[in-house]
Amino acid sequence: MTNSGQYLKAIWAAFASGAIAFLSALLTALQGEHTGWDTITPGQWCTALLAFFIGALGAGGVAFRVPNRPAP
C-alpha cells in the first residue's frame, strides 16, 4: 500500500471511530426521563468530545501502525 493509502486508511479509521464514540456518548446523555438537547450538561458535552478525541487518536494511530496484508 502506498503511503497515501496508509494515511487515508488511518484518517478514515480515526474519523469513524471518533464519530461512533461521540454519538454513543451523546445518546447516553439523551436517555432518561428528561430528554432533549437542552438537558445535556456542559460536562456531558465535554465527555462526548473527549470520547471523540480518544477514539480518533487511538484508532487512527493503530490503523496507521498496522500494515495491510500483501495481496496474494
Image (spheres, rainbow, N blue to C red):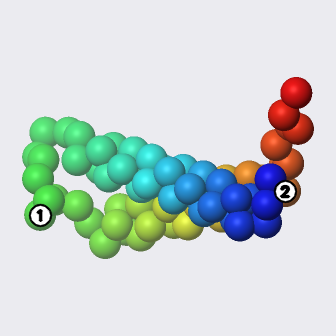
Quarter placement of the C terminus = top right
For this orientation, the residue located farthest to the top is 72
**Residue marked by disc 1:** 38
Front one among 44 and 63: 63
Camera-near label (2 vs 1) is 2
* Image side of residue 12 versus residue 25, left or right: right
Front one among 69 and 41: 69
Identified by mark 1, the residue type is Asp
Q: Which residue is drawn at 85% across and 48% down?
A: 67
**Residue marked by disc 2:** 65
Where is 68 relative to 16, above or below? Answer: above
Looking at the rendered structure, the secondary structure element under dot 1 is helix
For this orientation, the residue located farthest to the front is 72
* Image side of residue 46 versus residue 30, left or right: right
Earlier residue among tags 2 and 1: 1
Where is 24 relative to 42, above or below? Answer: above
